[in-house]
C-alpha cells in the first residue's frame, strides 16, 4: 500500500518549521525591514505547495494544529504590557487618547475608503483588523466575519509598510517626541513597528510595546460598537 | 529547567482554560485568549504572580510568536479568489490607511504630551 507523505498532519508542521528556520538563517544574512519573517515564510510555503502540486487542504492538516497556539499566545501578551505600563503613569492620557484616536481612524478610514474604492464588504471586513497584532487580529476577524487569511496579510502589510515609512513621515511632519513616535509605530504597525521603535530608542520601543495590546483591545471595542 | 517550564505552561494554560470557560459562558466565542490575558495582567498587577514565574516560556513564545501565524497567511491559497479584480484597490486602501493612522496618532500624541508638560509647568508656577 502506498501512503502519501502529505496525508500526514506532520507534513504541514515540518514544512512550516523547515521554512521558518530557513528564513531565519536568510534574515541573519541580510538584515532589512523589507525582509519580513512572516511574509517570506508564507511566500516560500506557497511556492513549495504550488511547485509540487500539493493541495492546500493537505498542508492545512498540520497548519491548523500550529494555529491552535493562538489562545496561549494571546494570554502571554499581558507580559510586555505589564512590563511597560509603568511608563503609562506619567503620560497615561496622551497614550490612551492616541491609541483611542489611532484605532478609530484606522477603522473609519478603511470603512470610508472602501466605499470610495468600491471594495466589497467581505474585503472591507477582512481589512478592518489591519492595525492589530496577529493573535488579537484573528479574534477580531472572527468577530466581524472577516476572512482570516486576508486579515493576517493586511496585518503584515501594515507592519512592514508602517515600519518603512515611519522615519520619513516623522521628519516630514515634525513629530520628534519619543512618546509620540513610539505610540504611532505601535498603533499602526504592532510588533513589526515595535522592533523599528526599539531601533529609534528605548522609550520609543517601550511605548510601542505598550500600544500593541491597547490597540488590540481598543479596536475590539470599536468593532463591537460599530459592526 | 524542565520543572520550571512545566510549571510556567501550567500557569499559562490554566489562565487560558479559565478565560475560555468564561468567554463560553458569556457567549463570546474566540475571546478566551483575551480574557486569559486580562487575568494574567491582573494577577501580575496584584503581585500574586511575578514575571519571573512565567519568564522562560514567555520569552520563548513572544520571541517566536510570528512562527505560529504562518499557516494563517498560507491559507490565502484557499481565499485569494476573493481578491480578484481588487488588487490595486486593496493595495491603495491598505497603504493610505496605514499612512493616515500613523500620522493622526503621531500628531495627536505629540500635541497631548506637549500640552501635559505645559500644564504641569503651569501648575508649578501658579502654586
Image (cartoon, rainbow, N blue to C red):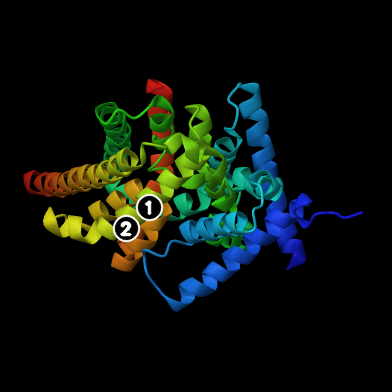
Q: Is circle 2 on the same chain as circle 1?
A: yes
Neighbourhood count class around disc 2 (C-alpha, 10 Å): few under 14, some 14–19, many 20 upward: many
Task: Identify the image quadrant of the C terminus of chain A.
Answer: top left
Give the SS element for disc 2.
Answer: helix
Residue A111 higher or lower than A37, as above or below = above
Q: Chain of mark 2?
A: A
Residue tagged by mark 1?
Answer: A159
Is A63 displayed left or right of A206 in the figure? right
Is B51 displayed left or right of A108 in the figure? right
Residue sitting at x 58%, y 64%: A20
Tell me if I can see residue A165 in this picture.
Answer: yes
Q: CA distance from mark 2 to mark 1?
A: 6 Å
Residue nearest the viewer, comparing A159 with A58 = A58
Q: Which mark is residue A163?
A: 2
Q: Position of residue A115 (x, y in %)?
A: 28, 26
Is A50 displayed left or right of B13 in the figure? left
Q: Position of residue A18 (x, y in %)?
A: 64, 66
Q: Position of residue A104 (x, y in %)?
A: 30, 33
Residue nearest the viewer, comparing A72 with A145 = A145
Question: Outermost residue, bottom direction?
Answer: A29
Q: Position of residue A194 (x, y in %)?
A: 38, 57
Is B22 displayed left or right of B85 in the figure? right
Residue A47 higher or lower than A62, as above or below = below
Residue sitting at x 32%, y 54%: A161
Residue B28 higher or lower than B98, as above or below = above
Amino acid at each position: 500500500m502506498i501512503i502519501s507523505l502529505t496525508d500526514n498532519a506532520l507534513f504541514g508542521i515540518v514544512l512550516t518549521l523547515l521554512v521558518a528556520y530557513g528564513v531565519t538563517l536568510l534574515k541573519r544574512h541580510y538584515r532589512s525591514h523589507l525582509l519580513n519573517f512572516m511574509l517570506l515564510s508564507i511566500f516560500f510555503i506557497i511556492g513549495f505547495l504550488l511547485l509540487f502540486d500539493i493541495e492546500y487542504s493537505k498542508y492545512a492538516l498540520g497548519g491548523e494544529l500550529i494555529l491552535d497556539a493562538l489562545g496561549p499566545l494571546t494570554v502571554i501578551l499581558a507580559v510586555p504590557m505589564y512590563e511597560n505600563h509603568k511608563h503609562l503613569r506619567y503620560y497615561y492620557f496622551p497614550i490612551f487618547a492616541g491609541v483611542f484616536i489611532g484605532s478609530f481612524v484606522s477603522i473609519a478610514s478603511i470603512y470610508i475608503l472602501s466605499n470610495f474604492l468600491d471594495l466589497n464588504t467581505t474585503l472591507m471586513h477582512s481589512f478592518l483588523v489591519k492595525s492589530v497584532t496577529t493573535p488579537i487580529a484573528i479574534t477580531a476577524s472572527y468577530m466581524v466575519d472577516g476572512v482570516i487569511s486576508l486579515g493576517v496579510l493586511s496585518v503584515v502589510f501594515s507592519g512592514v509598510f508602517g515600519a518603512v515609512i515611519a522615519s520619513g513621515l516623522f521628519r516630514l511632519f515634525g513629530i520628534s517626541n519619543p512618546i509620540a513616535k513610539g505610540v504611532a509605530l505601535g498603533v499602526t504597525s504592532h510588533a513589526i513597528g515595535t522592533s523599528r521603535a526599539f531601533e529609534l530608542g528605548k522609550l520609543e520601543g517601550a511605548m510601542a510595546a505598550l500600544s500593541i495590546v491597547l490597540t488590540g483591545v481598543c479596536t475590539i471595542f470599536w468593532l463591537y460598537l460599530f459592526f | 529547567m524542565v520543572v520550571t517550564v512545566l510549571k510556567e505552561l501550567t500557569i499559562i494554560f490554566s489562565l487560558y482554560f479559565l478565560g475560555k470557560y468564561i468567554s463560553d459562558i458569556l457567549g463570546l466565542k474566540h475571546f478566551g485568549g483575551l480574557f486569559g490575558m486580562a487575568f494574567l495582567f491582573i494577577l501580575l498587577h496584584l503581585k500574586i504572580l511575578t514575571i519571573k514565574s512565567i519568564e522562560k516560556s514567555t520569552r520563548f513564545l513572544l520571541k517566536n510568536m510570528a512562527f505560529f501565524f504562518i499557516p494563517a497567511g498560507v491559507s490565502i491559497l484557499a481565499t485569494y479568489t476573493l481578491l480578484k479584480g481588487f488588487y490595486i484597490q486593496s493595495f491603495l486602501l491598505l497603504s493610505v490607511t496605514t499612512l493616515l493612522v500613523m500620522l493622526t496618532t503621531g500628531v495627536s500624541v505629540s500635541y497631548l504630551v506637549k500640552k501635559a508638560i505645559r500644564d504641569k509647568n503651569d501648575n508649578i508656577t501658579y502654586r
